[in-house]
Image (tube, rainbow, N blue to C red):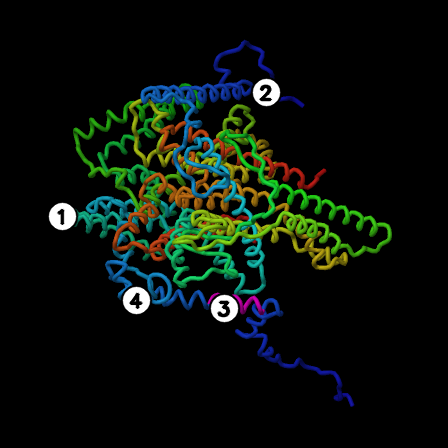
Amino acid sequence: MSDMSYVRSEMLPERAPPASSVGIVGWARQNLFNGVGNSILTVLALILLWIVVSRLVPWFFSPTWNSASLNECREIVGTGHGHGGGGACWGVIRDRWQQLLFGFYPEAERWRTVLAFALLFVALIPVLFNMISRRMNWVLLLAVLGLAALYLGGALGIIVGLALIAAAGFVGFKALSTSKEDRAAEIEAGAKRLPNPLIFSAIFPFVAPWLLWGGSIWLPIGAALGFVVGYIAFRYLTPIVGSLAGLIIAVLATVIWWLVLTGGFASIMSSIIPIGLEPVESRNFGGFMLSITIGVVAIACSLPIGIVLALGRQSDLLIVKALCVGFIEFIRGVPLITLLFVASTLLNIFMPPGTNFDIILRVLIMVTLFAAAYMAEVIRGGLAALPTGQYEAADALGLDYWKAQRLIIMPQALKISIPGIVSTFIGVFKDTVLVSIIGLLDPLGLTNAIRADVAWNGLVWELYGFIAFMFFVFCFSMSRYSMYLERRLRTDHR
Amino acid sequence: MTTITDPHQGQFRLSMLLYDSRYRSMTIQIVALIGFLMLLGWLLSNTAQNLADLGKEPSFRFMFEPAGYDINQRLLEYDSQDTHLRASLMGLLNTLLVAVLGCIAATIIGVVIGVLRLSPNWIISRLSAVYVEGFRNVPVLLWIVFIMAILIETLPQPRAFRSGDATMSFWESVAVTNRGVYIPEPLFSRSLGDVHVFGASSLRFDVSLDLLALLAVLIAGILTSVLIKRRADATQEATGVRPRTWHWRLGVVVVPFLVVMGILGFYLGYPELKGFNFRGGTHLRNSLIALWLALSLYTGAFIAEIVRAGILAVSKGQTEAAGALGLRPNRTMSLVILPQALRVIIPPLISNYLNLTKNSSLAIAVGYMDITGTLGGITMNQTGRELETVLLLMLVYLAISLTISAVMNWYNESVKLKER
């Protein structure tokens, strides 16, 4: 009887789940049709989607790429339903593509803007990402410069270009052929490292304006020398007069160099060694190039100013705090368009009589101030979110104010405020289209000119849709980058 | 316990202004103040010098000169012989009009999309995400101009209604044309007339007595309804049974209102096609509609994210705790989730209202005559008074912003968690 058993002694094999709960069907039942309400919503959404897609797709794929006017488009696609016939008229993009990118920048000089933005990427990579090695960065820089030289042509250009590209290839090959561990071992053994690519990122702010506006090369060099002058003054005066006085003198020396001596330096040097590019006037700037220029400068300058303003607003010094609060609240209380009115009509009135400085520079100043006020509030939020213990711990370690800010407070506060900072960046970039209202020819300003053209009169969707798409690409990638950065900097337990 | 910095005994030296922590902050502040005052003085003296050179003495007298331009979309009566001040007032009212309309529409859009984005239904939440990302990542000015262009280019012309190519919607009462939308206007056949306030000055306006009467009846009705609710609450407290009052509460609001409307002879004035255009009814111009749609769709996308974040911010334990207490789902929503979510939602919501109001200044791009279009646009160009007009413009926006943020701070204080 002992082998009789009413209890199963081994596990049954697993059976497949019912067909209705796995695969596409199961997923749809769980996510789309669980309940009457949800099913109705799903069906409505599908109908909406169908209406949009069934109209958009044939409209989008219309063979009008080579048409030269709206009438020609209509001939090609026929006057089907709705406005503009049954298809999009993409000829306008092909026809005005260059204008939408560069505005009225002289055609022969457009390579400079392209080079400036290629170099911008090279300069940004070491700042934004840490996934690319030091050597690959230099490879990129050499390759970009080489390509530019090749494009310029001429015997010299081709020789220099080929040499640069060959150098890039050589370094790139070495970088790819040695593994990360081998390289680390080499450095350990005393191999020379390439210089930090951030050096180029620091030089770039002086190179880019020169490429875009042209003129003598000695002006940006003079501006850069201001920092050198300040550094030398700080370095050699500090042991004599103490750190604080040294710093003050260094700042004064830099400002004096910029205000008084740079102009003379540049004119003397350019009469000795005249190197320069064809100057391009600001009113020829336009298109996405203008938007990106304003956006990048405002973004880059607003962050440090915003940090200073936020610290001022959080400080115990009553007068400094009042000044910062007043500035921030004033700027945040008025729309950007009024500040642009100030830029276009009033800023020259505020300056000493006879001053007449560039409209783009004026716009840059106002947009930067505007962005800085918003940035200050975002960073203040980050500062306020830090637990008091962090401040007290910094004090307990004996750090002074600036050391505590630099080593303890700011790294954490900035990390907390990344989403806010990046959404301010996106806002600034989007706000650059407002310059079309004061008559600068950014993409939106150009649409008026294009739509006023007889050939394209009456065009709506293609043109605005294209510009909207371009802005979407820029802004959406910025927001994705902020998510990446948040993940990269997350130091809590995962 | 000893202090590290023993009090300084010796006499005061000048370098102590920088190196002694007791004096340093004072030094920094005074230097900052002097620097600020010098900068301000420099700017002011430059301005005075420049203005003198241009022969423009700063003065606001131009505000009382005839404006000489027309404002097509306006809330009060105005003609081109009125002063710049009155033109600016029309502009201010137009700004407030589009701001209020926009805030209402943006809130509705934002709440609906924000809730839909949290829906377990995959396709609905994806579509809402597409809406949010699509609208947030494109400049609002582009949306305004884009929608304006669509309205002008794709809607039928008024004369298409004559030939029958287009028909009026909503039982022949609303005409959607490329010159704007014509909707019925409320009229009273036995009107009580208007009261003129401020005589013939630039700030004059008329108050319709019909409207006042209706408002009075409505407010009285709502107050009575609140009283009935109080009574019902008291009865429930005392007996445990809540009397059925909703029909009374509805009745005291609606019935007197309808009666007064009947007495005043309320009827709708429909737009009619006369010649090549519509007459009668209220004319909402394209510029207003484009601005309103663009601002509400754009801000709605931001509000949707705020609503979503607010609902997600209430921890799941709260819902479960409410369930454990035996609350029904709708009571859980109104008594537990919403009060906590609102605390998170309201401050950024109000700051978005503020943004919407400031963004309404972009009206100038489509020719909607808001305060920027009148005071900062035509008035500035006609009088050449850049300094004064821009200053006034900024003051107006600052006043609006500060009022809204004062309300926000007051609200924040009132809903703040009472911590010990």
Q: Nearer the viewer, residue B6 or A275?
A: A275
First along the sequence among labels 4 and 3? 3
Looking at the rendering, the stretch of residues picked out in magenta corresponds to A39-49
**Residue A418 horizontal side relative to residue B319, left or right:** left
Q: CA distance from mark 4 to mark 3?
A: 26 Å
Mark 4 or 3, closer to the camera: 4
Q: CA distance from mark 2 to mark 3?
A: 77 Å
The residue carrying mark 4 is A77
Mark 1 or 4, closer to the camera: 4
Mark 2 or 3, closer to the camera: 3
Instruction: Give the position of the N terminus of chain A as an image quadrant.
Output: bottom right
The residue carrying mark 1 is A154
Image position, residue A11 (x, y; %): 66, 80
Marks 4, 3 in one chain: yes
What numbered label is drawn on residue B5?
A: 2
The residue carrying mark 3 is A47
Placement of A448 over or under B40, stated as above or below: below
